[in-house]
Amino acid sequence: MIPAIKIENLHKHFGGLHVLKGLDLTVNKGEFFGLLGPNGAGKSTLINILAGLLKPSEGSVEVMGHDVVNDYQAARMALGVVPQELVIDPFFNVREMLRFQAGYFGRGKENDVWVDEIIESLGLTDKAHTNMRKLSGGMKRRALIAQALVHKPPVIVLDEPTAGVDVELRQLMWAFIRRLNNEGHTIVLTTHYLEEAEELCSRVAMVKQGEVVALDTPANLLHKFPTKNLCVKLSAGSMPVSLSAMVKQQEGNAYVLALTKLSQVEFALSELRKANAVVEDMQLKEADLEDVFLSLVGGA
Amino acid sequence: MSLINEQTRGVYTLFKKEVLRFWRVSFQTIVSPMITALLYLLIFSHVLEGRVQVYDNVPYTAFLIPGLIMMSLLQNSFANTSSSLVQSKVMGNIVFVLLTPLTHLQFFTAFLAAAVVRGFVVGLSILLVALCFVELPIVYIGWVLVFSVLGGALLGTFGIIAGIWSDRFDQMAVFQNFVIMPLTFLSGVFYSIHSLPPIWQAISKFNPFFYMIDGFRYGFFGQGDISPWVSLGVVITFLALLVVLSLKMLKSGYKLRE
């Protein structure tokens, strides 16, 4: 079966800067795929190459079997991209903008029913005739998502879609994107909210300095990097120096210790006893994707 | 739907969007240049009417009108493509077009057609208002139309080049202030180049604006500084050169897909 996205040996240089270093990645049809990495890892460069906004220095990228350079028209027809920046065209209202965008993809009046459906699903009905300039940040974000979907692309790329978005919109947006995914659309998501990726994505790739450092399902990644968090609250005494390397987070006298194995619980408690620290409260929590992420790319 | 229909609709949509873009701000894009041209007409005709005789049996005011029409047409065709591109680049919304399957040729065609339309609308508006006050013959309507379209296309193409090259509005202003404006004023809008000293006559013949304005004026009066066929040849040559350059820039993604 042809994958939704196939990236082989992708390199991108900006002058002397080697941003993507032979990246290989395959996203299957119907997947909800997460692309994670710190700022500067090369995620946006990868998306820009996928969207045809940048040319690769070396390697190949295909969308639904169409090369993004040699067969760019078919590749772009198959792709909808929600850009990270809140860009707007100040001359037009939401509906006009969506109809123009559909028109660029060769869609005419027959597409209006779909445009109306997107407008309604994203809660833009009241704003359909409002000029883009007059929309709030959240509404602009919805309009950008709608714009990426007007030509019903089988592959949808969302580049940090929830940055600066309130909880209500985030939930509405994910419900809609999930629906699209259930209907067979392939979704590629980049986000800084790792709990989103953990909850939504069937697979995630972690990118560090232009290379994929991990690629698996969130469950497998958590299994491969078995970490637990020991949360302790001290009522007396302080954290001994022998445990300072394990401290991941501190808020007053509440500490989160990152454990790589369960036997470290006993070690931590004995060190606290030795230091005459009194534990007021204690919890052992499973690690999440953020812990895996930090252990893999935290030093970037 | 066949691919051809999809592609045609894509170009038409971009063209329509570009036309609506200037139409939405028509006071700035149509009325304002029309008033500027009419002010030129009012002042120059008041000062020079009866003192300057360029062609036999052609009053100076009548001589001036085609030049002013063409000047405004050229400036506005340039402004349409260049300002749209620079604005889209500065605001970032150029990605809406770059993400689509439109080819570089389709992109070029849509932008250019909209520029020609704006130039034509501005020129026609000035002509219609001027005809209320001045009697103006149109001897060869064909030449008038040919030079309107070619002039608009030439400056629209130049605007695409300027718009792609410029990253900021002040860079685009360099083209307007140091290229378009001097070439316009040294092209015979307000005078016949035969009234210039020989050296300036010779220099004027390297100015493509001179040929566009003279050819256009020939359509009105049936007389000009040079044969309209020569003007046509020069304008087509310049247009072809700029079209090749702008298509190369668009195809390579220069400053757009970088």
Image (spheres, grey):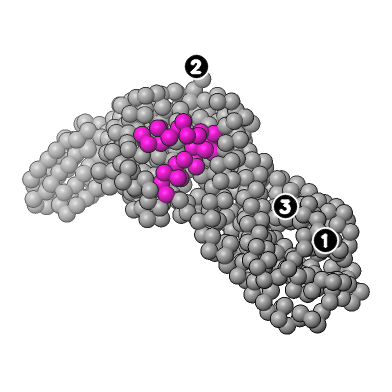
Return the chain for callout 1.
Answer: B
Distance (Cα) linking label 1 and label 2: 66 Å
Amino acid on which disc 1 is placed: Tyr
Left-right relation of B30 to B205 = left
Range of the magenta residues?
Answer: A93-118
Q: Nearer the viewer, residue B116 or B127?
A: B127
What secondary structure do most residues of the magenta stretch adopt? Answer: helix
- Numbered disc 3: secondary structure: helix
The disc, 1 or 3, on the residue closer to the chain's N-terminal end is 3
* Pointer 3 residue: B149
B87 in relation to A225, above or below: below
> Residue at position x 68%, y 63% from top?
B127
- Numbered disc 2: secondary structure: loop
Q: Is residue A215 magenta?
A: no
Mark 3 surroundings: few (<14), some (14-19) or many (≥20) residues within 10 A: some
Amino acid on which disc 2 is placed: Met
> Residue at position x 65%, y 68% from top?
B132
- Numbered disc 1: secondary structure: helix
Circle nearer the viewer, 2 or 3: 3
